[in-house]
Image (cartoon, helix red, strand yellow):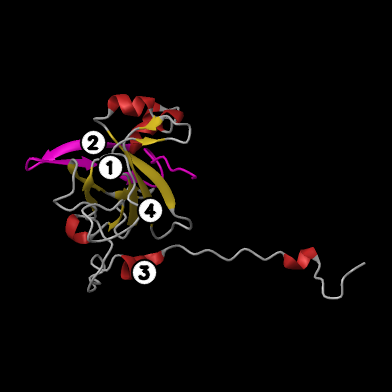
């Protein structure tokens, strides 16, 4: 017997909310300096490691390139990584020497490059128990992208770890795997890794559906 106040199941199904791209306004709220606006007292930005943080200090840089081969000048990227010991710092605090979470954006003053000042991450265990190669998780937002894109940055000088990584090794094509490998550079005696993210077309970066 139908209950007096019951509602048919068909009426309980809600329509999916329409999605929108991140638009040009993400910088205004989340990348104030890149948008040319005054920053907040406590700003989550691209300095994930302070000078006193223990570990190998590195800089990670790159560009974002669209399907036409043009630079995306207003992309926004969030980074999530382990520290040098392979541990994630889950409590964010600007007073700490290192935070696992950071934000960056492609900006005009850097030639449309994004950058992170961080530590070389240590290996983290996969769900299977096997160690994954050192990596940085990246989440990309930009105009024209309805749903954020997730990818990873690995390091070219971690050859053995990369070859054994249970995630990286699942990408069958060696050419496709290379789209995730950041190239090591030395600039003014400091270590820097470069990864250019290609959204579409030739050399398209591998994106993950986590």
The vertical placement of 8 against 115, above or below, is: below
Q: Nearer the viewer, residue 97 or 159?
A: 97
- What is the residue that sits farthest to the right in this orientation? 1
- The segment highlighted magenta reads 181-210
Q: Which residue is mark 2?
A: 183
Gap in Å between the C-alphas at discs 4 and 2? 20 Å
Whether residues under marks 1 and 4 lie with C-beta atoms below 8 angstroms apart, the answer is no
> How many other residues sit within 10 Å of disc 1, few (<14), some (14-19) or many (≥20)?
many
Gap in Å between the C-alphas at discs 1 and 2? 7 Å
Q: Which mark is residue 195?
A: 1
Give the SS element for disc 4.
strand
Gap in Å between the C-alphas at discs 3 and 2? 31 Å
Looking at the image, tell me whether mark 1 or mark 3 is earlier in sequence order: 3
Q: Nearer the viewer, residue 99 or 209?
A: 99
Membership of 185 in magenta stretch: yes
Q: Which residue is mark 4?
A: 140
Look at 49% across and 64% down and name the residue there. Answer: 20
Membership of 135 in magenta stretch: no
Location of residue 77 in the rendering, given as x and y in whole percent from the top left corner:
33, 55
Q: Which residue is mark 3?
A: 25
Whether residues under marks 1 and 2 lie with C-beta atoms below 8 angstroms apart, the answer is yes
> How many other residues sit within 10 Å of disc 2, few (<14), some (14-19) or many (≥20)?
some
The vertical placement of 210 against 5, above or below, is: above
């Amino acid at each position: 017997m139908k209950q007096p106040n019951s509602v048919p199941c068909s009426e309980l199904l809600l329509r999916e909310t329409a999605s929108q791209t991140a638009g040009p306004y993400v910088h205004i709220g989340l990348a104030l300096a890149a948008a040319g606006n005054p920053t907040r007292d406590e700003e989550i930005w691209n300095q994930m490691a302070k000078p006193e943080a223990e570990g190998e200090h590195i800089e990670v840089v790159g560009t974002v390139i669209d399907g036409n081969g043009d630079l995306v000048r207003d992309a926004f990227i969030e980074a999530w990584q382990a520290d040098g010991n392979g541990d994630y710092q889950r409590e964010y605090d600007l007073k700490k020497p290192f935070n696992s979470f950071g934000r960056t954006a492609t900006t005009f003053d850097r030639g449309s490059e994004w950058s992170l000042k961080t530590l070389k991450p240590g290996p983290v265990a996969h769900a299977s128990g096997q160690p994954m190669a050192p990596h940085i998780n990246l989440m990309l937002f930009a105009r024209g992208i309805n749903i954020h894109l997730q990818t990873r940055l690995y390091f070219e000088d971690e050859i053995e770890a990369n070859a054994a990584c249970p995630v990286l090794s699942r990408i069958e094509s060696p050419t496709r795997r290379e789209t995730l490998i950041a190239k090591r550079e030395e600039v003014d005696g400091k270590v820097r890794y470069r990864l250019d993210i290609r959204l579409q077309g030739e050399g398209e970066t591998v994106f993950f559906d986590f």
